[in-house]
Image: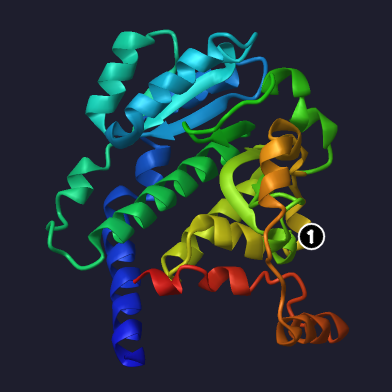
C-alpha cells in the first residue's frame, strides 16, 4: 500500500510540474493585460484587496461584493483576478468599476481528462501555484497587496482597522487556522491558513513566493503549508495575525464549542515535551508540509 501511495504522490508532483509549465511565471509576469492591471494597482492609494476566483465560486464572490458595498472605503480597494474568461466577463458586466484581469486556466485544465487520477486535486494545486506566481510577480514590481478569498466574512470595517500599518517592519502578515478558545487548535498556533495574507512588495517577498513555487513542484504540499515552513526563517519577516476577530465575532458559539471533551493523550504531551526540550521542529513547521499526504 505504501508503494501505491508513493506512486500516486509522485504522479501528482510530476503532473503539477508538467502542466504548470504551460503557464509559467514569465508568461504571467509579461502578459500584456496583466502588466496593465499591475500598473493600475500601483496608482491605488492603499494596498488593494485582491480576490482570486473562477466560475465555481462566482456567486459567492458577487455576494461578497454586495456586502462590501455597505462598508465605507472597502469597495474602492477591491480588485479581482479570475481563472476563467466567463467569470471575468460576468464580473465586468456587473461591476465594471472593479479592476480585474483574467489568467485563464481552462486550456490547461482541458488537457487533463475527466478520468485522470486525482484530477481535482491536481487542478487545486495548479490554482494555488498560479496564485503564487501572481504574488511573486506583484512583489517584484514593488506592489503591496492583500490576498483574500471570496468567502471571507468581514465582521467589521477591515479598511478602518489599518492592519498593515500596525506592523510596519513586517514583510508579510498571515491569518492562522482556528482560534484560541478551542483546545484542538492549541498545537496549531503557527498553522497559516492562507486565505488572507498581506505582502509588502520587495525582492525578499518575491523570493519567498518563488520558493513556494519551487516547493509546490517538488512536494505534495499546499501553498499555506509551505508558507508556514518558510516563515520559520526569520529573514522573511512573517507575522501571524491574532485570532481575536473570530473570538469577538462569535462569543456564544465559541462558548458552546468550547464545552467539548477534547483532551491530549499522555503520549502526545510527552512527544511535544521532547520536541521542545531538544528543539526538534518545536512549532511543527516541517510537519505542515505533510498535511495533504492522506488526501490521495
Furthest residue in direction right, as rendered: 277
**Residue under the image location 72 percent in, 87 percent down:** 267
Compared across the picture, whether 177 is left or right of 94 comes to right
Compared across the picture, whether 91 is left or right of 268 comes to left
Q: Decide which of 41, 293 is in the foreground and name it.
A: 293
Query: Residue 124, percent across and down?
Result: 35, 53
Q: Is residue 57 visible in the rendered structure shown here?
A: yes
Q: Is residue 173 visible in the rendered structure shown here?
A: no
Query: Residue 230, percent across and down?
Result: 65, 62
Compared across the picture, whether 231 is left or right of 141 comes to right
**Residue under the image location 27 percent in, 42 percent down:** 105
Q: Which residue is mark 1?
A: 234
Query: Residue 66, percent across and down?
Result: 47, 14
**Residue under the image location 47 percent in, 31 percent down:** 150
Does residue 122 lie above or below 237 as drawn? below
Q: Quadrant of residue 264?
A: bottom right
Q: Decide which of 127, 250 is in the foreground and name it.
A: 250
Q: Quadrant of residue 280?
A: bottom right
**Residue under the image location 64 percent in, 65 percent down:** 229
Does residue 284 lie above or below 183 as drawn? below
Q: Quadrant of residue 5?
A: bottom left
Q: Quadrant of the N terminus?
A: bottom left
The colour style of the image is rainbow
Q: Quadrant of the C terminus?
A: bottom left
Query: Residue 249, percent across and down?
Result: 70, 31
Q: Decide which of 17, 226 is in the foreground and name it.
A: 226
Dot 1: element: helix
Counting the numbered discs, the total is 1
Q: Are there few (<14), some (14-19), or many (20+) residues within 10 Å of tag 1?
A: few
Amino acid at each position: 500500500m505504501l508503494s501505491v501511495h508513493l506512486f500516486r504522490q509522485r504522479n501528482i508532483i510530476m503532473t503539477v510540474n508538467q502542466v504548470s509549465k504551460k503557464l509559467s511565471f514569465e508568461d504571467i509576469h509579461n502578459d500584456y493585460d496583466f502588466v496593465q492591471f499591475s500598473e493600475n494597482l500601483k496608482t491605488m492609494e492603499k494596498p488593494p484587496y485582491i480576490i482570486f476566483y473562477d466560475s465555481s465560486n462566482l456567486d459567492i464572490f458577487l455576494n461578497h461584493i454586495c456586502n462590501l458595498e455597505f462598508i465605507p472605503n472597502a469597495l474602492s480597494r477591491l480588485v479581482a483576478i479570475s481563472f476563467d474568461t466567463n467569470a471575468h466577463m460576468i464580473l465586468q458586466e456587473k461591476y465594471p468599476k472593479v479592476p480585474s484581469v483574467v489568467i485563464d486556466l481552462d486550456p490547461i485544465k482541458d488537457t487533463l481528462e475527466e478520468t485522470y487520477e486525482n484530477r481535482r486535486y491536481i487542478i487545486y494545486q495548479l490554482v494555488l501555484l498560479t496564485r503564487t506566481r501572481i504574488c511573486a510577480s506583484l512583489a517584484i514590481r514593488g506592489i503591496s497587496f492583500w490576498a483574500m478569498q471570496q468567502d471571507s466574512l468581514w465582521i467589521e470595517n477591515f479598511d478602518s482597522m489599518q492592519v498593515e500599518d500596525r506592523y510596519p517592519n513586517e514583510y508579510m502578515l498571515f491569518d492562522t487556522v482556528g482560534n484560541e478558545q478551542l483546545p484542538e487548535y492549541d498545537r496549531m498556533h503557527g498553522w497559516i491558513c492562507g486565505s488572507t495574507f498581506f505582502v509588502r512588495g520587495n525582492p525578499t517577498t518575491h523570493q519567498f513566493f518563488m520558493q513556494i513555487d519551487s516547493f509546490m513542484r517538488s512536494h505534495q504540499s499546499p501553498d499555506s503549508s509551505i508558507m508556514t515552513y518558510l516563515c520559520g526563517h526569520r529573514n522573511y519577516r512573517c507575522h501571524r495575525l491574532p485570532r481575536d476577530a473570530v473570538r469577538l465575532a462569535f462569543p456564544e458559539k465559541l462558548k458552546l464549542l468550547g464545552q467539548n471533551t477534547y483532551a491530549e493523550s499522555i503520549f502526545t504531551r510527552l512527544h511535544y515535551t521532547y520536541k521542545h526540550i531538544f528543539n526538534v521542529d518545536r512549532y511543527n513547521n516541517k510537519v505542515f508540509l505533510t498535511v495533504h499526504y492522506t488526501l490521495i
